[in-house]
Image (cartoon, helix red, strand yellow):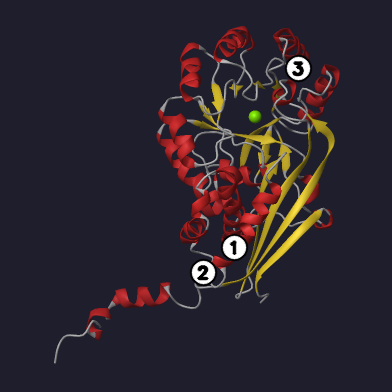
Amino acid sequence: MTATATPPTSALAGPGAALVAASAGPSTVDRIAHVKLSSVVLPLATPISDAKVLTGRQKPMTEVVFLVVEIQTEGGHEGVGFSYSKRAGGPGQFAHAREIGDVLIGEDPSDIAKLWTKLAWAGASVGRSGLATQAIAAFDVALWDLKSKRAGLPLAKLIGSHRDSVRTYNTSGGFLHTPIQEVMENAAKSLEAGIGAIKLKVGQPDWRTDVARVTAVREHLDPDVPLMVDANQQWDRATAMRMGRIFEEFGLVWIEEPLDAYDAEGHAELRRALDTPIATGEMLASVDEHLRLIEAGAQDIVQPDAPRIGGITQFLKLATIMESKRLEMAPHFAMEIHVQLAAAYSIEPWVEHFDWLDPLFNESLETRDGRMWVSDRPGLGFTLSDQARAWTVATAELGTRP
Ligand SMILES: [Mg+2]
């Protein structure tokens, strides 16, 4: 009789066998039964302009389109995630998600790394960055929400927190379409609401307008209030250097996106020349794209955006790389996700405060003492509001409701 491929029973005996049995038992394994996709169009109260509009490259932004993913399992667990797009890409994200999403049906929702890869392979011909990755992000965020809810923990605690609150600054009050008097009023309101710092948009066609606005706000606020500026990629290298030198006297926390988002060498040169820290990264659409800038020494502060780089799984990979380089973190937009991830980063980070998404959820984040607080609700801690349902323009359902 020849040997069979099946090992003798004795090889599985002992304490190890008990561990194998426990890890694969019905108490840990669950199956994804149903996935609902929604395209939600959030209207903005006022058309929004940053430097990209003033240089004629984009139109004022009037809405943000969300790809919302709701996952249900056979075991009765649920997770909600989202991705988003501004000005273009919303219908594309939704269409791509609908094409690839059914590979999740029947899978164990705990195997998030495996599922990310499975989704990426399902759409491999459109690449691993940009719109394709952003569609995957909505699934990935929902899976992390589900896993942390199942553990009964806020996501930050599941990952491993360094803190329960994160420094926060306001962006939404300082756009370029807003008259300076209103910018100053908005700044005062933000500080009263417990937000700790103020960011102003710059990059106007006439540089003197930028200097005048920053000067006005700097003089209006208590000298201890930290201030940042954001040029949204609209300076060339010479202008960025000149403006960076002019702004040195303001002691800014950072200058954001002084140059084209992919100009690694230009950012690195600026960083070497200026005392003011350089922040960038919000436009990048994968960990690999971030890696190129990090390796070039392009920035002091990395501004990753989880929905843009493929979700929480990819964000955590990037955070590990950033940590090894001792880089600071200030994630872009989507504070509902990023407060959790920033709380789990070792170096004291900043989270960007935008109130735009508030109507989408029944819950809201607390700001106090200059900080944004991680709620004690499990998961991301958000449920979709009736308003979000009312703004839904398309849905698709995959699998079967349990
Ligand atoms: Mg920005």
Can you identify the residue that label 2 sits on? 108
Q: Nearer the viewer, residue 242 or 102?
A: 102
Give SS at disc 1. Answer: helix
**Residue that appears at 82% across and 28% down:** 189
Nearest to the eye among marks 3 and 1: give it: 1
Quadrant of the rendered image holding ligand 1: top right
**Residue that appears at 57% across and 53% down:** 136
| In the image, farthest residue toward the bottom | 1
Residue 39: give x, y in percent of width and height.
Answer: 73, 54
| In the image, farthest residue toward the left | 1
Name the residue type under label 2: Asp
Q: Eyeballing the image, is 315 above or below 105?
A: above
Residue 165: give x, y in percent of width and height.
Answer: 62, 40
Q: Quadrant of residue 226?
A: top right
First along the sequence among labels 3 and 1:
1
Can you identify the residue that label 3 sits on? 221
**Residue that appears at 70% across and 47% down:** 90
The reply to whether residue 215 is in sight is: yes
Image side of residue 197 versus residue 358, left or right: left
